[in-house]
Image (tube, rainbow, N blue to C red):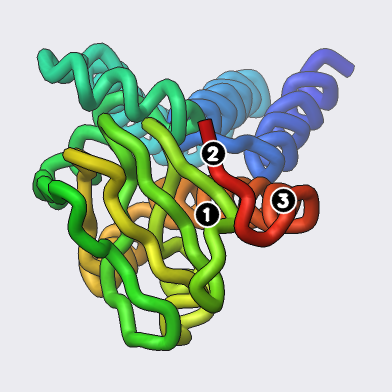
Amino acid sequence: MFETVVLNTAYVALVGSTFTRTALQLRLMILSGSCGFVLFGLLADIPSMAAWNALVGVLHIINIVRIVRRQRTRTTDVQADWLRQVVFAELEPATFNRMWESSWVGDYDGRTLTRQGEAHSRLAIIVSGMVDVRIDGEIVNRLGPGAMIGEMSLMSGSVATATTTAVGRVVVREWERSKLASLGQEDADVGRAVEQAALRSMVYKMQMIRTTVPGQEFA
């Protein structure tokens, strides 16, 4: 009876692993299942089952230690920490750090970041300053720190849907679309985080456009 309980508990752990959301949770669930199979192998006198699952368990323990060490990594860049918390809160710090390292600083002083109807291959996130958004020459929004620029082109691969212009000096972090795609292929968490942040930004902007009177000035 006890052997049956142990075996079924191990199977439950494996099934549960399919519902995990992070690599750490996945490995912990599989490790739990491996421990159950080791115990069952010992109780049922199946040495090969116990040995193989013990090996699997050790490998997962090694990877769990690596993941925990990476999660403890914190960037010393205050700007990066702020941006992760505001835009990519679902990303683990170490994962975000890899994404951050692939970006660069864009400094715009009264200059245009995107032009409506023109191809745009970069994603930008405002770090400081304000940016006016114009559609067909009319100001429809004004964006501040934490706002995305170029996410619609990023998601659809189409030309820019609006012209964005810095109001005075504006500092942004920028990523090439191709680099973000590459990071997303290497780490699914990055791909999901970028997509979710872009969708949130698009929904916000659409809501602002609907509630903004054409030609309205912003304070």
Distance Cα–Cα, label 2 vs label 3: 10 Å
Residue depicted at 61% across the width and 58% down the height: 215
Residue depicted at 52% across the width and 30% down the height: 219
Whether residue 148 can be seen here: yes
Q: Is mark 3 on a helix, strand or loop?
A: loop
- Circle 2: residue type: Phe
Q: How crowded is mark 3: few (under 14 residues within 10 Å), some or many (20 or more)?
A: few
Q: Nearer the viewer, mark 1 or mark 2?
A: 2
- Circle 3: residue type: Thr
Whether residue 45 can be seen here: no
Distance Cα–Cα, label 3 vs label 1: 21 Å
Residue depicted at 27% across the width and 67% down the height: 122
Q: Nearer the viewer, residue 26 or 178?
A: 178
Residue 211 image point, x, y percent:
78, 49
Q: Residues within 10 Å of mark 1 (few under 14, many from 20)?
A: many
Q: Nearer the viewer, residue 122 or 110?
A: 110
Q: In which quarter of the image is residue 167?
A: top left
Residue 138 image point, x, y percent:
55, 66
Residue depicted at 39% across the width and 37% down the height: 56
The first of marks 1 and 2 along the sequence is: 1
Distance Cα–Cα, label 1 vs label 2: 24 Å
- Circle 1: residue type: Ala
The first of marks 3 and 1 along the sequence is: 1
Which residue matches tag 3? 212
Q: What element carries label 1?
A: helix
Which residue matches tag 2? 218
Q: Nearer the viewer, mark 3 or mark 1?
A: 3
Residue 9 image point, x, y percent:
76, 25
Q: Residue 198 carries which label?
A: 1
